[in-house]
Image: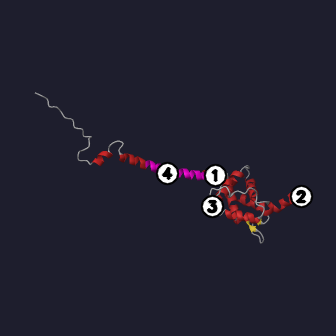
Amino acid sequence: MRARKRVHTDTSTVSKDEPKEVEESKQPGSMSELHKKIDNLIVMVTALTEEVIALKKEWRLENKDPLNINSHGNINDIIYPEKPFETPEAFIQFNNELKLEEKFDLLVNCFLQKCTYTVKAKSFIFNCWKTLITDEAAQHFAWINTTNKTLVQNLLATAAIKKAFQKKYGEDNVNVFEEKSKKFFLNSKDRCVKRRKKQ
């Protein structure tokens, strides 16, 4: 008696009733699969691009030479003065430019880069002021309210030095900042007199 030949049916094959589009989407390397991969890659590249832009901006603020940066990326507008301001008018004009947040932040970073050669908190404050204003011009300002002098506590340049000081030495030393700043302006006239005597 002859044995019947068994016929193996492959259940993994696609049913004849399935649409052609579904059949193609299940095939390895199909257009549908490729489109999904491309979409995922676009999302990843966009996210990475945004992250790189943010990192570049952060690096630019912290590491690039502040003398060649302004809010528009030009090199003509100097953030940090090449030398201390010699007149109160020039110092006030510079202070007004700090209303732009980016310029204010750049000045803070300038102090941290250029005045950190000392480890003493009081010396750091003094050096910051010395890079901004001469003793002759400082005589027109005061730390406490007076009738004939501009109050320096309200100036943005003061806020920038204070912020840099707190970043370097912590927020617990605010009294040190106020004390040294007050003495800088209070003793500016005496320093001028001493220099004249040495000449």
Residue denoted by label 3: 101
Is 46 contained in the magenta span? yes
Task: Indicate which disc residue 8 carries.
Answer: none
Range of residues picked out in magenta = 40-58
**x and y percentages locating residue 59 in the rendered image:** 61, 50
Q: Earlier in the sequence, mark 2 or mark 1?
A: 1
Dividing the picture into quadrants, the one containing residue 16 is top left
The quadrant the C terminus occupies is: bottom right
Q: Secondary structure at mark 1?
A: helix
Real-space Cα separation, disc 4 to disc 3, in angstroms: 26 Å
Is 169 contained in the magenta span? no
Density class for disc 4 (Cα within 10 Å; few <14, some 14-19, many ≥20) is few
Q: Earlier in the sequence, mark 2 or mark 4?
A: 4
Residue 188 falls left or right of residue 19: right
Classified by dominant secondary structure, the portion drawn in magenta counts as helix
Residue 9 falls left or right of residue 28: left
Residue 150 falls left or right of residue 198: left
Q: Amino acid at mark 1?
A: Glu
Q: Nearer the viewer, residue 88 or 142?
A: 88
- Closer to the camera: disc 2 or disc 4? 4
Q: Amino acid at mark 4?
A: Ala
Real-space Cα separation, disc 3 to disc 1, in angstroms: 15 Å
Task: Indicate which disc residue 197 carries.
Answer: 2
Real-space Cα separation, disc 3 to disc 2, in angstroms: 42 Å
186 vs 120: above or below? below
Task: Indicate which disc residue 62 carries.
Answer: 1
Q: Nearer the viewer, residue 8 or 28?
A: 28
Residue 171 visible in image: no
Q: Earlier in the sequence, mark 3 or mark 2?
A: 3
Real-space Cα separation, disc 1 to disc 4, in angstroms: 23 Å
Q: Earlier in the sequence, mark 4 or mark 3?
A: 4
